[in-house]
Amino acid sequence: MMGRLPIAMLLCGLQVFILGAVCGQQIDIDLNEGPYPTDTTDESLTPDCREEQYPCTRMYSIHHPMKQCLHSLCFYSLRRVYVVNKEICVRIVCLQEEIMKAELCREKSGWPRRIQRSTKTCRHHELLNWKRS
């Protein structure tokens, strides 16, 4: 997965360069410091939290200059081009948040709420009475 990171940084840098050239602004790009940390191990995570990687695909539009020539007369136009940006993002997931999201998903899908399991043990004669009725 780390092989995709330099490619994504290169594509982002190229897009910033193109947008800077189109807008007429000069933009300095430092490819060594990207939005992604180089070290994925984080000591500040609690034991019930973990890092999870997920695809965060985005689609956005850019104006791409197109040259159209008719005999010796050429026209330049800015056409809207849609670009799909496929990246791998990292988020921190904790156990308590995961349980709350699962409970919310159950409620939205129509399932009843889960009740708290009790730690009390059943008595044997209560089970026998329950089976007889």
Image (spheres, rainbow, N blue to C red):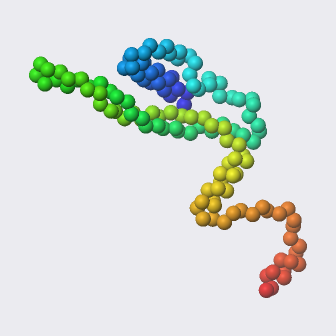
The residue positioned 71% from the left and 62% from the top of the image is 114
Q: Is residue 47 visible?
A: yes
Q: Is residue 43 left or right of residue 69?
A: right
Q: Give the position of the N terminus as an image quadrant.
A: top right
Pick the quarter of the image with the C terminus: bottom right
Q: How many marks?
A: 0
Q: Quadrant of residue 19?
A: top left
Q: Nearer the viewer, residue 105 or 22?
A: 22
- 11 to 26, vertically: above or below: below
**Which residue is pictured at 78% across the width and 61% down the height?**
116
Residue placed most toward the observer, 127 or 71: 71
Q: Residue at x 37, y 30 (%)?
A: 62
Specify the farthest residue to the bottom: 133
Above or below, 34 relative to 81:
above
Residue 132 location, quadrant: bottom right
Q: Residue drawn 55% across and 27% down? A: 2
Is residue 1 left or right of 113 when viewed as pictured?
A: left
The image shows residue 51 at horizontal and vertical percentages of 66, 36
Give left or right: position of 70 versus 55: left
Residue 54, placed above or below residue 116: above
Residue 102 coordinates in the image, percent (x, y): 65, 54
Q: Position of residue 90 (x, y in %)?
A: 60, 35
Residue 14 visible in the displayed image: no
Q: Is residue 90 left or right of residue 71?
A: right
